Amino acid sequence: MSRRSARGSSPDATDDPDESFGAMTLTEHLAELRTRIIRAALAVILGAVFIIAFYDQVLDFLVRPYQRLCERRGPEFCDPQLFILDPIEGFSTRLRIATYGGMILAMPVLLWQIWRFIVPALHAKEKKYAIPFILSSVVLFLAGGAVAYFTVERALEFLISWAGEDVDQVFRVSSYIRLVGIMFAAFGVGFLLPVLLVFLQLVGVTTPGALIGAWRYALIGIVVLAAFITPSGDPISLAMLSVPMTLLYFVAAFIGWLALRRRRPGPS
């Protein structure tokens, strides 16, 4: 009877994700990580191939804010034509755009692989948030990228105006694409702040009350973080990133309050 009980209890122990995660050896953890990395890399490569196939259209889309600025302010303010000053610059720029675009297109796969790697360590009530977190992360990242795209023109106008009237503005295509790519990444990551805050509330690391109570410190931290991650350092980009992040901070506290309220058992 005891042997049967022992055998009957073992499947329950191994089927528990938390226990099975803890029982995994270091080699098994590394194998799991390697599998997730390979799948994520393949997704990025496929996305990069797609971007290369439509490279001219993508490049035109990225350069459009700068060209609009030059058309609006006139040729004496800036030259709408970007230049290449190195024989391999065209090839490296194409690879950079393909890599950036491939990562953006593969983002749902990247987030899913990250979630699947950490999900064994989560409780069942936390695992059900996988799809909402992934979808919200993709939407918020793209929203941040959209804000960055419409900020590029104003940010460049501010930066060029500080160069002086006697300075001709001639930009390399690689430098411009690097600036736009970093701005996309900075704004996209900044807009992911509410996802992190909501997750921390759901797992009990913080509470909505604590977030609201620390709003003054959060505001200072958001401004400092926005100033640190914006590549141009201009006040326009700083405002365009810090203001939405501040609003999203309070939205995250409200969403966490709603989620925790639904968890509370009703009156008996």
Image (cartoon, helix red, strand yellow):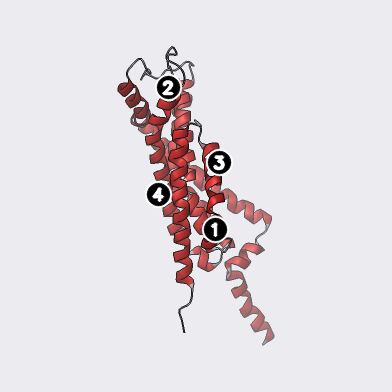
Please name the residue that numbered disc 4 is placed on: 139
Spatial distance from mark 4 to mark 3, Cα to Cα? 24 Å
Q: Is residue 245 above or below residue 100?
A: below
Can you tell which mark lies on residue 224?
Answer: 3
Q: Nearer the viewer, mark 4 or mark 3?
A: 3
Indicate which disc, 4 or 3, sits on the residue closer to the N terminus: 4
Q: Pointers 4 and 1 in contact (CB under 8 A)?
A: no
State the residue in front, 36 or 132: 132
Look at 65% across and 61% down and name the residue there.
24
Q: Where is residue 5 in the image (x, y as percent from the top left)?
A: 65, 83
Residue type beneath disc 1: Gly
Please name the residue that numbered disc 1 is placed on: 213
Spatial distance from mark 2 to mark 4, Cα to Cα? 34 Å
Q: How crowded is mark 3: few (under 14 residues within 10 Å), some or many (20 or more)?
A: few
Residue type beneath disc 2: Ser
Residue type beneath disc 4: Val
Indicate which disc, 1 or 2, sits on the residue closer to the N terminus: 2
Q: In which quarter of the image is the N terminus?
A: bottom right
Please name the residue that numbered disc 2 is placed on: 161
Spatial distance from mark 4 to mark 1, Cα to Cα? 28 Å
Extreme residue in the bottom direction: 1
